[in-house]
Image (cartoon, coloured by chain):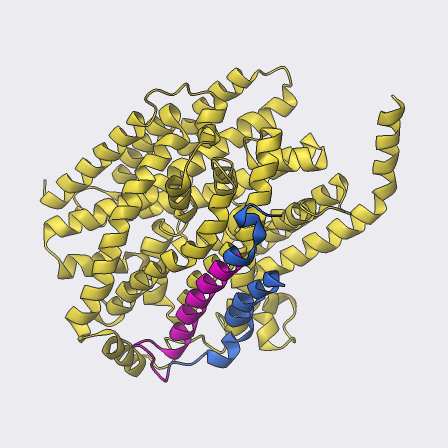
Chain colours: A yellow, B blue
């Protein structure tokens, strides 16, 4: 057993200890388990809200895309920044409404706003369907990290199983408290390691940042800008817009908003989170270093780890692997918890209304290993790259945005039927596009290149909004009649 | 009026990108497009700080 593997397993056990320790002194009812009793202070909320920045998506996927795609990788810095701007007004409104109505899940928000449990079931299904590829992404990353950092002595499959068992145990026991504690360790580690690697490696191999970029531009002219076709400027703009709107629509992220102690924390976070995510630059730099130092990798997601093994001693590779492991475990735990809550509270309870809150909490906990097994299955048969998986998930959750944003308005013209039809139409469009690999260019081959390069998620969003508006206008009278009948009763 | 400041990051990151999509000149050691994006992130942070200051809701107001 090499020193890297020892260090990785030590961190794995430490995160399990932290996850279990987080339960101490707390009665784990549904509110404590899912939203931490709505008592998290500014630091924990900052870390949880920033959790999206440092996942395996950015750690491996960010460097992988810098290695394989070049300039288009910069979209990752933009969408988070714009989402934080939106969050200044959006998250306090969500938090306030959730506190008033004692909401536990994202689906609860839609159920209460539109007074429609059926809409809640649809939102839950969309959420879970989008979260599975997100979880698969984390597990794929986890397998790659441990396998590479252990110099192949642990297979990706074994690493995935060990990681899933650890996460499942601490999610079942401690819920969001376990995620919060390990998130603090994860962010502290990743911050130091990424800054060190992103500065040291360009200087070590090229003598600085500009010499590195100049060498890449000489070897691959235009690689560092957006290409004229494919991942072009119009792809960049549409993808940034789509992912910024979908940023807080992830069920685990949306529900994490409920766990704050006050709404003021979100407004403060919107100032500092854009700067905090600039650390991602250094992840990209590692990927860029690898372009000329580790050429020819079939899987760009491995570029950071392959380069680390070339440049650093075994024990340090173990530290990098441990940080990478935490980037998979923390978001993985949040995803498992959110999925289990959605299924137990917003699907099962709708069909079995006599279920008590205690039974919902118990069911949610026992659903965790089942969802984990489903994710492991898809991970082991999968083959897509990390960023591709995330973009598909984003296209799905963004379909919740139109109905959500209208629900925050004082005079919401969208009816529950309109919201349901819009989300369903959008999700079906995403499904069709994903399965058949359609792009805007294949649907409309004669359109200008800029239109053909648009992210197909935008098409689904337009379909969603049009259907939502038409159905809402057609069912306005229906809802007036319904409320009149209820008043008459 | 302070709310309208929030439109600036969107203009920087969405509308201006076609005009800064180039590698040279290098600024602070970065390709020009990357420098522009980093600048946009920093400007966003400053703007959000300004909005926070100007918004009476953060100082016990309405």
Near-viewer residue (A315 or A136):
A315
Examine the structure image and report whether residue B37 is included in the region drawn in magenta. yes
Q: Position of residue A294 (x, y in %)?
A: 22, 66
Name the residue rendered at 57%, 65% in the picture: B5
Examine the structure image and report whether residue A281 is included in the region drawn in magenta. no
Position of residue A424 in the picture relative to residue A102 (left or right): right
Name the residue rendered at 62%, 48% in the picture: B62
Q: Residue furthest front?
A: B60
Magenta-tinted stretch: B24-51
Q: Is residue A107 visible?
A: no
Q: Is residue A390 visible?
A: yes
Q: Position of residue A435 (x, y in %)?
A: 55, 52
Name the residue rendered at 29%, 66% in the picture: A285
Quarter of the image holding residue A337? top left
What count of labels does the image hold?
0
Name the residue rendered at 52%, 76% in the picture: B16
In this rendering, the answer to whether A220 lies above or below A247 is below
Position of residue A275 in the picture relative to residue A472 (left or right): left
Near-viewer residue (A102 or A390):
A102
Position of residue A117 in the picture relative to residue A398 (left or right): right
- Which of the image's four quarters has the C terminus of chain A? top right
Quarter of the image holding residue A330? top left
- Which of the image's four quarters has the N terminus of chain A? top left
Q: Position of residue A73 (x, y in %)?
A: 40, 65
Q: Position of residue A133 (x, y in %)?
A: 46, 45
Give the main secondary structure of the magenta stretch. Answer: helix
């Amino acid at each position: 057993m090499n020193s890297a593997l020892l260090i990785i397993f030590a961190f794995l056990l430490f995160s399990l200890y932290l996850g279990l320790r987080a339960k101490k002194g707390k009665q784990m009812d549904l509110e404590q388990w899912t939203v931490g009793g709505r008592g998290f202070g500014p630091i924990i909320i900052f870390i949880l809200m920033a959790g999206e920045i440092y996942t395996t998506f950015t750690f491996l996927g960010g460097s992988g895309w810098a290695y394989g795609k070049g300039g288009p990788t910069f979209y990752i810095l933009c969408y988070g920044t714009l989402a934080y701007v939106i969050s200044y007004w959006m998250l306090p409104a969500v938090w306030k409404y959730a506190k008033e109505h004692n909401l536990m899940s994202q689906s609860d928000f839609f159920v209460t706003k539109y007074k429609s449990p059926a809409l809640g079931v649809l939102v839950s299904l969309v959420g879970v369907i989008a979260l599975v590829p997100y979880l698969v992404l984390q597990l794929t990353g986890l397998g790659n990290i441990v396998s590479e950092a252990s110099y192949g002595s642990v297979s990706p499959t074994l690493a995935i199983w060990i990681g899933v068992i650890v996460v499942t145990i601490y999610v079942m026991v401690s819920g969001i408290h376990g995620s919060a504690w390990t998130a603090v360790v994860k962010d502290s580690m990743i911050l130091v390691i990424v800054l060190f690697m992103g500065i040291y490696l360009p200087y070590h191999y090229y003598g600085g940042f500009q010499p590195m970029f100049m060498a890449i531009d000489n070897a691959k002219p235009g690689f560092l800008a957006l290409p004229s076709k494919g991942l072009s400027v119009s792809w960049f703009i549409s993808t940034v817009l789509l992912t910024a709107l979908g940023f807080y629509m992830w069920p685990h992220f949306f529900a994490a908003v409920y766990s704050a102690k006050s709404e003021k924390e979100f407004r403060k976070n919107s100032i500092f989170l854009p700067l905090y995510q600039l650390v991602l630059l250094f992840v990209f730099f590692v990927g860029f270093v690898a372009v000329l130092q580790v050429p020819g990798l079939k899987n760009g997601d491995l570029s950071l780890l392959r380069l680390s093994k070339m440049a650093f001693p075994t024990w340090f590779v173990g530290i990098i692997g441990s940080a990478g492991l935490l980037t998979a475990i923390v978001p993985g735990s949040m995803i498992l918890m959110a999925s289990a809550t959605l299924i137990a509270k917003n699907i099962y309870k709708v069909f079995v209304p006599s279920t008590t809150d205690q039974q919902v909490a118990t069911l949610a906990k026992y659903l965790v290993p089942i969802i984990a097994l489903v994710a492991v299955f898809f991970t082991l048969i999968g083959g897509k790259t990390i960023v591709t998986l995330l973009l598909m998930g984003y296209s799905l959750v963004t379909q919740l945005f139109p109905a959500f944003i209208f629900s925050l308005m004082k005079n919401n013209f969208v009816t529950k039927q309109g919201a349901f039809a819009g989300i369903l139409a959008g999700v079906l469009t995403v499904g069709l596009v994903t399965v058949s690999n359609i792009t805007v260019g294949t649907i409309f081959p004669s359109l200008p290149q800029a239109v053909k390069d648009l992210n197909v998620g935008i098409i689904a969003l337009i379909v969603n909004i049009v259907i939502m508006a038409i159905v809402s206008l057609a069912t306005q009278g229906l809802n007036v009649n319904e409320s009149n009948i209820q008043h008459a009763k | 009026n302070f709310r309208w400041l929030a439109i600036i990051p969107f203009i920087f990151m969405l509308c201006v990108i076609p005009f800064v999509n180039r590698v040279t000149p290098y600024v602070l050691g970065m390709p020009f497009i990357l420098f522009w994006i980093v600048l946009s992130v920093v400007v966003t942070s400053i703007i959000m700080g300004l909005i926070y200051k100007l918004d009476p809701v953060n100082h016990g107001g309405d």
